[in-house]
Image: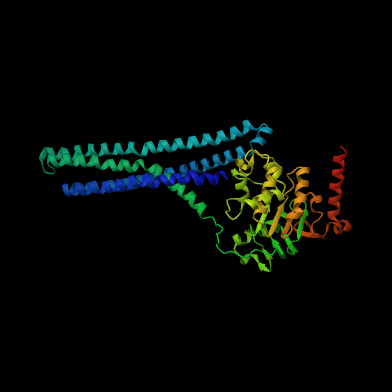
Amino acid sequence: IGKIVSRVTNDTETIRDLYLGVLARVFSGIITMAGILVAMFFLDYRLGLVSLIIIPIVYFWIQLFQKLATKNNFKVRSLVADMNGQLNENIQTMPIIQAYAREKEVLAEFEQKNEENYQTRAKLLRLDALMSHNLSYFLKNLTLALLIWVVGGKSLTNGSFLSLGILYAYIDYVSRLFEPVTQIMNQLSPLQQALVSADRMFQLLDEKGEPVEQGRVARFKGAVSFKDVEFSYEAGNPVLREIQIDARPGATIALVGHTGSGKSSIMNLLMRFYDPSKGQLLIDGQDVTTLPKQAVREHMGIVLQDPFLFTGTIRSNITLGNPDISEERVRQAIEAVGADRFIDRLPNGLDEPVIEKGATLSAGERQLISFARALAFDPAILVLDEATASVDSETEAVIQDALLTLTKGRTTFIIAHRLSTIKDADEILVLDHGQIVERGSHDVLLAMSGIYAKMYALQSKRNLELKSS
């Protein structure tokens, strides 16, 4: 994330400087050089021809500078991105770093990158100092010295080549000619940095994006079918195989299984973050791959295990700025999930400020707000991905009571590790290594004495032990 942010902020700012200052100075320098060369030809065509030698010198000068500077400029931009990425990661994980007393190690790692960045920039500064204005002044003085020594001396002794006035004017033009040359040379370093930044930005812009489609579809009834669906993140390594699910409108489908069994992958397909590698995913009989992704998601709501709150207020986190969500709908949503118990106690109620990631709220409070957000959008299909995993027992009881009301009229998919939360589901699907190995209601699966029954027995035993202790 930090590396992407670095490209969006630092690299774009460098490109901005290119258009605001660098190109203007380079083009004005080129025009000034051309004007002075033309004036030299009017003064004396022989001196004008001699002066043209400055053009190949400047060209090879620029080529040499680019060859020497490009590698280090790429390295600087990469190091800046790495440092931003590390800072972003360190700030987000600071409690972990402090808990394991890794402050010194993390600082040392950052200092190493910072020192490398310093040394690389120092190389660029030395190169810039050597090949920009200093070299320009040296060449100007060398040219004037040669001119006075060779041409001027010969003319003054026999008067066969130049008059004193023309020689003086020519020396003045040479001095003026090197002013735009120096100006151009001084822009080589920022020009090279901008070209490197542009290359990095185009790498980001050339990444395949997801088109924002304007098409919309009517609200789903909620019939969801997976027809022999297979899916793999990497070719040849399927994570889902022969998935068959038929959810009628308003049904509650629960997905259980060990970590890596494919539960979240099914949700990713349903939300169209990915599309099936094989088979079909149908909603109300329509293949979702034929529908705009935004249109599909418009009628879906999702609550994740780790809820994310944006900087703003509780109200803005529920509505996400959607003007179609009225105050009444917001109120109904928070009351339905029981969030009004703590929101009404806050000094500003729904207008209580929320800082980054909702750091001033407890995990349970953040989860209740994310529930209210999903409900305020009134989705036809609701996805609960381990939605009660981060809440305490009391809050879980409140959510369980609310879920009976919330799931009415909408198809609900629940991923759960706490099997006690899905006993009332219409169908429970047990996944193992990407396949559905058991399916049925809670009572049916217990009677089968299979994987689900063993999982439920282990959790019930653990809960009894916790209560007795």
Q: What colour scheme does the image use? A: rainbow
Residue at image position (69%, 45%) is: 340
Q: Position of residue 300 (x, y in %)?
A: 66, 58
Residue at image position (63%, 61%) is: 296
User: Would you say 270 lies left or right of 320 here?
Assistant: right
* Quadrant occupied by the N terminus: top right
User: Would you say 314 lies left or right of 120 here?
Assistant: right
Residue 233 visible here: no
Residue 38 visible here: yes
Q: Position of residue 412 (x, y in %)?
A: 73, 58
Residue 234 versus residue 58 in the image, above or below: below
Residue at image position (69%, 43%) is: 365
Q: Position of residue 83 (x, y in %)?
A: 55, 39
Residue 216 versus residue 187 in the image, above or below: below
In the image shown, does 286 or 251 lie closer to the viewer?
251
* Quadrant occupied by the C terminus: top right
In the image shown, does 337 or 152 lie closer to the viewer?
337
Among all residues in the image, which is located at the extreme front?
328
Q: Position of residue 227 (x, y in %)?
A: 72, 66
Among all residues in the image, which is located at the extreme bottom?
285
User: Would you say 61 lies left or right of 328 here?
Assistant: left
User: Would you say 182 lies left or right of 13 here?
Assistant: left
Q: How many marks?
A: 0
Residue 350: image quadrant is top right
